[in-house]
Image (tube, rainbow, N blue to C red):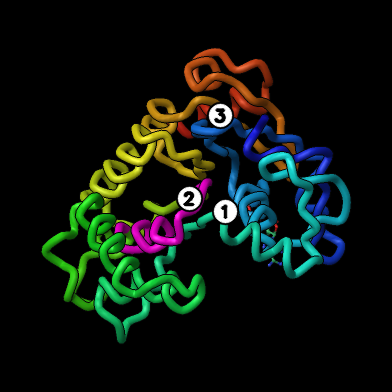
Amino acid sequence: MPQIEIKSLNAYYDKLHVLKDVDVKVEKGEIISLIGPSGSGKSSLLKMLVGLLVPKSGEVKINNETINYENKKDLRVVREKIGIVFQQYNLFQNMNVLKNVCIAPTKIQKRDPKQAEEQAVELLEKVGLKDKLKSYPDELSGGQQQRVAIARALCLNPQILLLDEVTSALDPELVQEVLDSIRLLASEGMTMLIVSHEMSFVKEVSSKVIFMDNGSIIEVNDPKLIFESPKEKRTSDFVSKILRDK
Ligand SMILES: Nc1ncnc2c1ncn2[C@@H]1O[C@H](COP(=O)(O)OP(=O)(O)O)[C@@H](O)[C@H]1O
Ligand SMILES: [Mg+2]
C-alpha cells in the first residue's frame, strides 16, 4: 500500500490551472524528487499535499485513506502525518533553538514538555547542533537555521517529510551540511518528497525522479535514467540545460 497516492489531481489558483491530472505514488521509505523549470508546479504539489492549496478534482490517499481537504479533521490528520520545510526557514526569532523545536509538539500536539524536549535535543544532535540549543536564530548561519527547521519538522513525528528547495537560499559552502542531514534521514528510511536544484544530490538519494513542466508530470524515471537517457524531449532539454549551467 502506497503511503501517498495522488490520482488525476487538478488544482487552480483562480483561473491558473496549476496542477494538471497529476498522478503520484509514494511507497514507504521512498525518496522522490521533483525537478522542473521554475513555475512548473513543484511547490504547488507539495502545498496541495499539506492543504495549502485545495484540489478541484482528483484524489489524495494517505495510508489508503482518502483525504477531504475541505474537512478540518482531515486537515489535522494530514498535518500530523506530513512535515514540510521551505526555503525560508521562518524560525521564531525570540525563541532559542530548543524552544523553536519544542513549541509545536507541546502547544499543538499537547505532548509532555519534558518528553518533547528530550526528543528535540536528540534531533538537534542528529542534525549536528548539539552545542547550539540555547542559541537564538540570529546567532546561527543559514545552514544551521535550516537544520533547526528540519529538526522542528521532525519533532512532530511526521511519517512523510516534504522539502521544498531547502538549500536554495544558502551560501554554497553551507549547502552540504544541510544535504548531509537529509542523507541521514534518507538512510533511516524516512519517506520524502524533495524539490531541489542540487542535481547530483537528487541523483544520489532519489528512488525516483519526477520531471514536471507547466503543471503536468512529463516523466517519472530512475534518477540515473532521467539524467542520462530521458524518454521525453522536454526532460532532456531541461536536464541538459541545467547540467550545462552548473
Ligand atoms: N499563491 C499563488 N497564487 C497565484 N499563483 C500562484 C501562487 N503560487 C504559485 N503560483 C503560480 O503557480 C505556478 C506554479 O508555481 P509553483 O508551484 O511555485 O512552481 P515551482 O515551485 O515549480 O517553481 C506559477 O505560474 C506561479 O506563478
Ligand atoms: Mg517552488
Marker disc for residue 209: 3
What is the magenta range?
147-161
Amino acid type assigned to the residue bearing label 1 in the image: Lys
Residue 74, placed above or below residue 22: below
Q: Residue at x 36, y 41 (%)?
A: 185
Q: Position of residue 115 (x, y in %)?
A: 32, 66
Q: Position of residue 69 (x, y in %)?
A: 77, 61
Marker disc for residue 163: 2
How busy is the neighbourhood of tag 1: few (under 14 within 10 Å), some, or many (20 plus)?
Answer: some
Q: Which residue is mark 1?
A: 81
Q: Earlier in the sequence, mark 2 or mark 3?
A: 2
- For the view shown, which residue lies furthest in the left direction? 131
Q: Earlier in the sequence, mark 3 or mark 1?
A: 1
Q: Position of residue 72 (x, y in %)?
A: 74, 70
Helix, strand or loop status at disc 1? helix
In this rendering, position of residue 190 left or right of residue 232 = left
Classify residue 59 by image quadrant: top right
How busy is the neighbourhood of tag 2: few (under 14 within 10 Å), some, or many (20 plus)?
Answer: many
Q: Does ligand 1 reach within 8 Å of label 1's beta carbon? A: no
Q: Does ligand 1 reach within 8 Å of label 3's beta carbon? A: no
Amino acid type assigned to the residue bearing label 2 in the image: Leu
Total marks shown come to: 3
Amino acid type assigned to the residue bearing label 3 in the image: Val
Closer to us: mark 1 or mark 2?
1
Q: Residue at x 53, y 28 (%)?
A: 239
Q: Earlier in the sequence, mark 1 or mark 2?
A: 1
Q: Position of residue 9 (x, y in %)?
A: 81, 45
User: Which quadrant of the figure contains the C terminus?
Assistant: top left
User: Which quadrant of the figure contains the N terminus?
Assistant: top right
